[in-house]
Image (cartoon, rainbow, N blue to C red):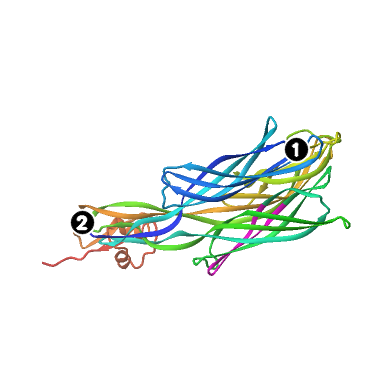
Amino acid sequence: MKTETQVFRGYGKRKQLSAQTAVECRFSNAETILSAHCSAVLTGADVVSGEVRYYGKAHFSIVYENAEKTILRAEKGVEWAATVKDDFCYPALTARARIGVENVSVRREGASVYATALLGCDISLYGEQTFEYLSGGDLILRREPVKVLTCHLVSGTAEAGDEFETEFVGDILQHSETANITDLVSETGLLRVEGEVNLGILALKTPDCLASFERLIPFTVEIPCEAAAFGSRAEAEVSVVDVSIKAEADEEKGKCLLYAELTLSAEGCVYEEAEVDAVTDAFSPTHKTELVFATAESGGVGEIVRLTERISGKCALSSPVDFSDQLQAVTLQRAEADLVTSETGKTVEGVAMSALIVLGADGTHRGIELSLPFSVPVDAGDGEVFAAVLGMSARQKQEGEIEAEATLKISVKERRTYTARLVQNAEEREALSLSDSAVSVYIPRAGDGLWELAKSLKKAPEEVAASNPDIEFPVKEGQRVIVYRKRTLL
């Protein structure tokens, strides 16, 4: 028995890995820590046999109060490297890694303060995807179009900036940035990534008074891609790799003009849908046949659901407050969220967090961690969640209780998987016992389609249909099927 096969070659995500690593930085002569922040930038990820090596830079900043009740700041940068081991890894794969700061903790040892950042890394491994499938031969074949997604990796950089006026500030102590994608547009030969960076700034207004404010800075990253076309599905991640903030103060007017310049890096994937004319079933009219099946699977992104939600409520506090405390600043806003499925549908559940800095009755400042839980219903499929916190404010209506309000920007990126069971090859077995009658009448099972009936009769579907022009498929209860066989006269 002769068979013909073909090989489909595409490109896609082969595996997803996750890892964590801790990065530490030492500060000397820092007294009471009011807020600690870390931003991490990935500078590379390499795949070798059995592991992925990824590395980058971390920038730590702390705001603290010394024994003289003077508010000061300190900054340091460190380089880091880490590995994640997996037997699947081999050098031909390409790693796309996304780094995030999951937590920052501070501890004191003698006269030094150690800030430790826990970095979480999601690593997607991309490589060639191939599968072999039966394409022809001496069998009767059932051909069906099978959809396959193949991806094209893209990357690009862009500059964004803004200038804006604020009330007079004496010094900028700390800043944080969160990039939020608002739209992905595929055009002929181009992927355009649009969004906004939420720039949060903690500033010193007077020697004993802090203030916090935010600014949304729009950005656009245009990435050339030959495979991009109108309507192409795509996904992307944007990170802020460099920030420069300058201030010009006008003490007479009590104003300050701030200039912010950002360098952005975008990495993404444009998906192309291909259609393979594959064989999903086959049989021989003369012999029993053993089919070898294979599963062709490819994945990509589906719909991206975006929504804005206003949340409010009572916060959990890392330390107590009372009416003698003056609330001065809410800074370092961030969120953790997951997609939860229940009987009533899907919700994005998580917690919005920030650092609240207060001035006590004794004239000293202290930092308090705020946690505001939230649950937002969402109409989306299974996928990945991103949540950003904007404009968080806090107040103490009842003594010892902090109520907060914030705006959430939520994105749910649905995952889409195409799976098909294909005939990879076929092996001929013993000959069939064939009827020698010229005409046979069969009573099929109700609901049988043309292919199922042809396979049971060991006849080509076209031949069965031609012999029974009055029958509609699938067949109904009680219908009869006639099979004609050619006879050779001796």
Which residue is at 25% across, 59% downward? 285
Marked residue nearer the N-terminal end (1 or 2): 1
The amino acid pointed to by label 2 is: Leu
Image quarter of residue 446: bottom left
In the picture, measured across the screen, residue 319 lies left or right of residue 362, that is left
Image quarter for residue 23? top right
Magenta-colored stretch includes residue 14: no
SS of the residue under disc 2: loop
Going 39% across and 64% down the picture, which residue do you hit?
Answer: 472
Residue ranking furthest to the top: 110
- Residue 49 at x, y percent in the picture: 41, 45
- Image quadrant holding the C terminus, namely bottom left
| Residue 125 point in image, percent of width and height | 47, 50
Dot 1: what SS? strand
The image position of residue 185, as x and y in percent, is 59, 64
Overall secondary structure of the magenta stretch? strand
- Farthest residue, direction right: 252
Residue 266 percent across, percent down from the top left:
58, 58
Q: Badge 1: how crowded within 10 Å, few (<14), some, or many (20+)? A: some
| Residue 368: mark in rendering | 1
Mark 1, mark 2: which one is toward the viewer? 1
The residue indicated by pointer 2 is 434
- Which of the two residues, 422 or 82, is positioned nearer the viewer here? 82
**Residue 183 seen by the camera:** yes
**Whether residue 152 is situated above or below residue 53 in the rendered picture:** below
Write the start and end of the magenta stretch as one range: 178-199
Label 2 packing within 10 angstroms: few (<14), some (14-19), many (20+) = few
Say whether residue 189 is magenta. yes
Q: Residue furthest bottom?
A: 188
Q: Using the numbered discs, state the Cα–Cα distance from disc 1 to disc 2 in whole angstroms.
A: 85 Å
Residue in the image at 79% along x and 34% along y: 67
